[in-house]
Image: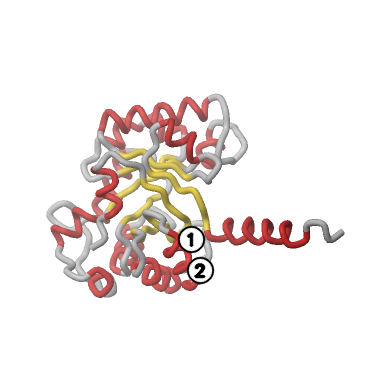
Amino acid sequence: MNDRLKRIWQDGETAHGGWLGLYDDYAASIMGDVGFDYLVVDMQHGSADYTQATRLLQSVSISASVPLVRVPWNDPSIIGRVLDAGALGIIVPMVNSAEEAAAAVQACRYAPEGARSWGPTRAARLHGDYQPTAVNDVVACIPMIETARAVEAIDEILAVAGVDAIYVGPADLSLTYWLPPAGDNEGPFVNALETIVDACTRHDVVPGVHANSSLAAERRSQGFRMITICSDDQALAQGAAAMLRDGTAGSR
């Protein structure tokens, strides 16, 4: 199994990832060739349903990138299904309490550490020797911190055994501080990021954040060690726009 993500974290390094908002498996394979440490299939706000997500996971799994999924909600049924489909980590939206974090952990782990049901139909084919103990060690459980309420409860959330990392959703976090939904903001948003990273350091949990290439260096300097810097649809739009500008320069 691909334990690249956890090895990076164990070495104290920073993982840089990509985001898959499209449902095209060819686009996913192209993203897999780029060299991201991880790639996230977005089933919450992205285009992929479960059937499409299984194809995306297969495309990512043949690359060196670790296949993750952001599930639509903290629901053990969909978490179990995408793990059986081949995800090696789950990003869980809107986790606001220790109880919700514990529910996510339970869904990600086989007994005795959790309550995940056995049946890794596609995962065993994609990842080879799929044994419960090894899987529990490799699969990453990553609750999202997206509200002021979650920031207030951050120590309780991070104290839950089995939480490997957290992932800041900056747009929703900004909204709860009465700020525009954006990847970056001032004032209480900056204070919240500092509170989150400090708590992660105390609890030995990896702080992650949704960002972009222009924000990545700043987020690294703030202490984040899981940073998403590119999405497939963003790369397509920005790359095509840049090529159009280059190709038509001086033509008018």
Q: Residues within 10 Å of mark 1 (few under 14, many from 20)?
A: many
Quadrant of residue 174 in the image?
Answer: top right
Q: Residue at x 52, y 42 (%)?
A: 172
Q: Position of residue 4 (x, y in %)?
A: 28, 54
Of label 1 and label 2, which has the lower sequence position?
A: 1
- The residue nearer to you, when weighing 53 against 31, is 31
* Residue that numbered label 1 is attached to: 20
Residue 47 position in % (x across, y down): 53, 65
Q: Nearer the viewer, residue 242 or 56?
A: 242
Q: Amino acid at mark 1?
A: Leu
Left or right: residue 208 versus residue 88 is right
- Residues at marks 1 and 2, CA–CA distance in whole angstroms: 9 Å
Cβ atoms at labels 1 and 2 below 8 Å apart = yes
Residue 123's mark? Answer: none
Q: Tell me the crowding category of disc 2: few under 14, some 14 to 19, or many 20 or more residues within 10 angstroms, Cα based.
A: some
Q: Residue at x 25, y 42 (%)?
A: 11
Q: Locate residue 83, reporting x and y percent.
A: 30, 63
Comparing 226 with 221, the one in front is: 221
| Residue assigned mark 2 | 27
Say which residue appears at 65% left-offset and 61% top-offset.
Answer: 240
User: Under tag 1, what secondary structure?
Assistant: strand
In the image, what residue type sits under mark 2?
Answer: Ala
Up/down of 214 relative to 37, above or below? above
Residue at disc 2, secondary structure: helix
13, 101: nearer the viewer: 13
Nearer the observer: mark 1 or 2; the answer is 2
Residue 38, horizontal then vertical, whole percent: 38, 55
Name the residue at 48% across, 67% down: 30
Residue located farthest toward the right when viewing the structure as drawn: 252
